[in-house]
């Protein structure tokens, strides 16, 4: 079952069918699950995609595979993600990335201390283990940035 909602030029879609097909098309792929098996395969992310991982919060959980972490420039909501998030803890243990490879945290992004995306082809990954308030603020920031760019 495919559902689509449009709001002033922004389209939100969901599909209970083939996740790989949707990931291949998505500019923004957002996961909010307690999955213990990777749902998003990194090889399916298109250039310039953003992967938002907000569901998993312990070592046994992982919403994406190592390839997604390897291909993306990873940002976190806070330092707790580096020791709690299954996607990141596992990637560190397997040598996929190192903690020094993390692009920054949410506060650094919002204040402009760190740059989120260096070019239109770069894949970005945001991993949150924090509160729902942080997730809502991140979504608001993405939406407001999009709206501002459309009015330029």
Image: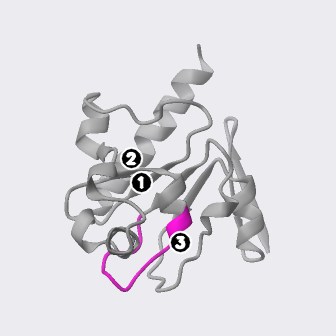
Location of residue 76 in the rendering, given as x and y in whole percent from the top left corner: 32, 54
Secondary structure, mark 2, is: helix
Which residue was labeled with disc 1? 126
- Looking at marks 3 and 1 on the same chain, the residue that comes earlier in the sequence is marked by 3
Of badges 3 and 1, nearer the viewer stands 3
Eye-nearest disc, 2 or 3: 3
The disc at residue 65 is 3
The percent position of residue 106, horizontal first and vertical second, equals 29, 45
Question: x, y percentage for residue 5?
Answer: 71, 53
Circles 2, 1 touching at the beta carbon (< 8 Å): yes
- Disc 1 crowd rating (10 Å Cα; few below 14, some 14-19, many 20+) is many
In depth, the one of 5 and 104 nearer the eye is: 104
- Tell me the distance, in whole angstroms, between the alpha carbons under discs 3 and 1: 14 Å
Give 56 or 93, whichever is nearer the viewer. Answer: 93
Real-space Cα separation, disc 2 to disc 3, in angstroms:
22 Å
Residue segment shown in magenta: 54-67
Left or right? Give the position of 136 relative to 120: left
Residue 20: give x, y in percent of width and height.
73, 69
Whole-number angstrom distance, CA of label 2 to CA of label 1: 9 Å
As rendered, which of 95 and 81 lies closer to the eye?
95
Q: Is residue 98 above or below residue 145?
A: below
Element at label 1: strand
């Amino acid at each position: 079952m495919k559902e689509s909602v449009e709001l002033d030029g922004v389209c939100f879609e969901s599909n209970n069918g083939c996740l790989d097909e949707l990931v291949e098309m998505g500019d923004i792929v957002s996961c909010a699950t307690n999955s213990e098996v990777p749902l998003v395969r990194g090889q399916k992310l298109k250039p310039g995609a953003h992967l938002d991982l907000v569901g998993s919060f312990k070592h046994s959980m992982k919403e994406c595979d190592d390839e997604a972490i390897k291909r993306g420039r990873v940002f976190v909501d806070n330092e707790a993600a580096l020791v709690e998030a299954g996607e990141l803890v596992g990637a560190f243990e397997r040598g996929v990335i190192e903690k020094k490879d993390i692009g920054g945290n949410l506060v650094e992004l919002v204040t402009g201390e760190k740059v989120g995306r260096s070019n239109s082809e770069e894949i970005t990954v945001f991993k949150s283990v924090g509160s729902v308030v942080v997730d809502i603020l991140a979504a608001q920031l993405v939406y407001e940035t999009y709206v501002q760019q459309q009015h330029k």
